[in-house]
Image: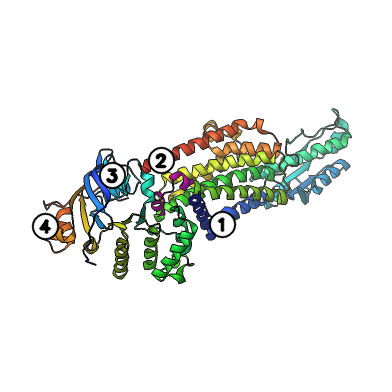
Amino acid sequence: MNRFLGFVKKEFLHIFRDYRTLIILFGIPAAQILIFGYVVSTDIKKAGVAILDLSGDETTQKLSDKICSSDFFHLTENLLTYNDIDRVLKKGKTKAVIVFGENFGRNLVSEGKARMSIIADGSEPNAATLVTNYITAIVTGFNQDLAGVPAMNGPRIVPVVRMFYNPSLKGHFMFVPGVITLILILICALMTSVTITREKEFGTMEVLLVSPLRPLQIILGKVMPYFFLSLINVIIILLLSWLVFGLPVKGSLVLLMAESMLYILMSLSLGILISTVSKTMQQAIFISLVGMMLPTILLSGFIFPIENMPGIYRYASVIIPPRFFIVIIKSIMIKGTGFIYVWKETLVLVVMTAIFIGLSIRKFKIRLQ
Amino acid sequence: MGKKKVFMNKVITVGNLVKKFGSFTANDDLNFDVYEGEIFGFLGANGAGKTTTLRILSGLSKPTSGKVMVAGFDANSQAEQIKKNIGYMCQKFSLYEDLTAKENIMLYGGIYGMTLSLIRERTTELMERLDFREYANRLISELPLGLKQKLAFSVAILHEPKIVFLDEPTGGVDPITRRQFWEMIYETAQRRITVFVTTHYMDEAEYCDRVSIMSEGKIVAIDTPAELKRKYNAESVEEVFVKIARPVNNQPHPPASSPRGEG
C-alpha cells in the first residue's frame, strides 16, 4: 500500500509542478463555461428591432411599446415606408422589422383579426429564428392582455409558442450540461493518455514496469489523481453556473455526482486505451483532441439536436459516450428527474467503461507478452 | 581495477532459453551463467536480441521455453519476486525531471518497499558519498548530465538488489563522466552486487569481468576480455566483436529489418 501511495503522491507533484497542466485542468473549464454562457449563448439581449407602423393606432402603439420595453429588444428606428426596410436591415444593427399594415387597427376591430409581419435578417439564421420566436411569444402574451382572459373569440394575430422546462428561454441552461460533458471527456481522456505516454516517452515507464509495482497499480496510480481533480472540476462548474448564471440543479445532487463519477471513470478508461495505442505524447494529444472534441460537439446533441440529424449521423452518435451522459445530466439538472428515467443511459455508460477497460488490459498484456 | 576476483555463487542461470515472437526467433537457445559480484558485459549489434533477453531476465517477459533463474527465482513463474530483487537503469534517464533529487529517491525507495527510516538513512549516506548535499532539493532538470546519471544509478541500487541491470547506461555521455560512472560500477560490484550491463562502447567492454557477444539471437562468444582477445587473435574486444558479430562472408548485410527492433 505504501508503494502505491508514494506513487500517487508523485503523480500529484507532476500535476501541481506543471502550471500548464493546472491551466488545462482548471482554467479551461472555467473559461469554457463563461465563454459558452456569455458569448455563444442563444439568449437575446437587447436585439435591435425597427418598427414600421402604418396603422398608427392605440393597439399598435401598445404592442410596439411592449416589444421594445422588454429586455430582449430595443427600438433602433421608426420607419415611414416599406422602402426603408431593406436599408435598415442592411445596416446590420436591426435584426428584425415589425410591420403593421395600414388596415391593422380597422381589421382588428371589425373582423377581430389582424395581420402583422415580422421581417427578420435571414443572413443570421439562428438569430433570426430566435428573434421571430421571441416576438411571436410577446405578441401572444399581448393577445391575452387584450382579451382580458384567453378567449376563443379574442383577437388572434399569431399562434401560441410555449417552452417546456425552460420558460424563461435561457440559453445557459442548454450549455452547462453540454460543457460539463465536453470538458470532462476532453480533460480526462487527454490528461490520462498524455501522462501515461509521457512515462513511455521519457523511459520511466520501463523502470516502473521492472519495479515491484504491478501494472494495475501503475495505471491506477496515474489515473487516480485525475479522478479526484475531475470531480472537483464538476463541482467548480456547477458552482460557477449557479453563481454566475443562476442555474440550479433541479434533481438530486447526489445522483448527479454519482453519474458524473461514472462518466469520469469512462473517460479515464478511454484515456488509458488511447495511451496504449499511441507511442508519443503528440499522438495521444491528437487522438484525444481531434478524436473526442469534434464528435462530442457535433454528434452528442450538445449543439445540434440528435433528432434533427440525418439517419446515418443519428446511428453514428450511438457510439459516442457523451451522447448518453448529456441526456443524463440534462434530465437531472434541468428536468429534475430521478434515476428511473436515466437507467438505460447509465447502463450504456457502464458497458462502455467495461469495454474500454477490457480492451486496455488486453493491449497492455500484449505489450508485455 | 584489474584485481583478481573469485566468483562462486551463480545469481543468474540461463538454460536453453528460447524466445519467439510469432515465427521470429529473438533468442535462440541461450545458455550462460552470471555470478555474484560479477560485472557482466552483454554485447551485440542492434537487433541481435539483447533487449529481449534483458526483458526476460528482469521479469518483464516470459521465455517461450527454457529455464531462467534470476536471484534464485524462476522467470517463468516468479516474475514478481525477481522484480523485488533487481535494480534497473536504462539509457534514457530513469529519474523524473520535475521532481527533486530527494523526491526521486523517496519515490523509488517507496516503490521498492523500503521503510521511511531506511530511505532517510540511505539518502544521507548517498548524499555524502556522491558529495551531493547541495543538490538534494534541486529539480532533476536543473542538474548536469553527469550528476543525473550518477544519481540514477544510485537510485537503481538504493534497495541493495542482488543484480542491477544497466541498459546502455552511458549513451550520449562524455568520456570523463563515463569513466566516473564505471568507477561507481566497480564499487558496486565490490559490494557483491552483480552488474549486468549492455553497451555499444567496446572500450567499456574491456572493463567487464566477462563479456558475451550476441548475434542473430545466439550467443556466439562468452569469456573474459583477455581470453576472447587471445582466442580470436585480436588487439581489442572491439576487434573481436567486429570479427564475430559480423559473419565471415564479407558480403554486406542487407538493411537489417528484424520484426522487432531494440525497443
Q: Earlier in the sequence, mark 2 or mark 1?
A: 1
Q: Name the chain letter of the residue that bears numbered label 3.
A: B
Q: Secondary structure at mark 1?
A: helix
Instruction: Kindly identify which numbered label has been placed on residue A257.
Output: none
Query: Which image quadrant is residue B92 in?
Result: bottom left
Q: Are marks 4 and 1 on the same chain?
A: no
Q: Amino acid at mark 1?
A: Leu
- Pick the quarter of the image with the C terminus of chain A: top left
Q: CA distance from mark 4 to mark 2?
A: 47 Å
* Mark 3 to mark 4 CA distance (whole Å): 28 Å
Q: Nearer the viewer, residue B82 or B151?
A: B82
Q: Residues within 10 Å of mark 4 (few under 14, many from 20)?
A: few
Label 4 chain ID: B
Q: Are marks 2 and 1 on the same chain?
A: yes
What chain does mark 1 sit on? A
Mark nearer the viewer, 1 or 3: 3
Res. A22 mark: 1
Disc 2 is attached to a residue of which chain? A
Q: Of B204 and A177, which appears nearest the observer?
A: B204
Q: Which residue is mark 2?
A: A363
Marks 1 and 3 in Cβ contact (< 8 Å): no
Q: Amino acid at mark 4?
A: Lys
Residues B38 and A52: in front is: B38
User: x%, y% of residue A180?
Assistant: 61, 45
At label 2, counting other C-alpha atoms closer than 10 Å, the crowd grade (few under 14, some 14-19, many 20 or more) is some
Q: Which residues are magenta?
A: A204-219
Query: How many marks on residues?
Result: 4
* Residues packed near mark 1 inside 10 Å, few (<14), some (14 to 19) or many (20 plus): few
Residue A210 is covered by the magenta coloring: yes
In front of the other: A215 or A184: A215
Q: Which mark is residue B68?
A: 3
Determine whether the residue tagged by mark 2 lies in a helix, strand or loop. helix
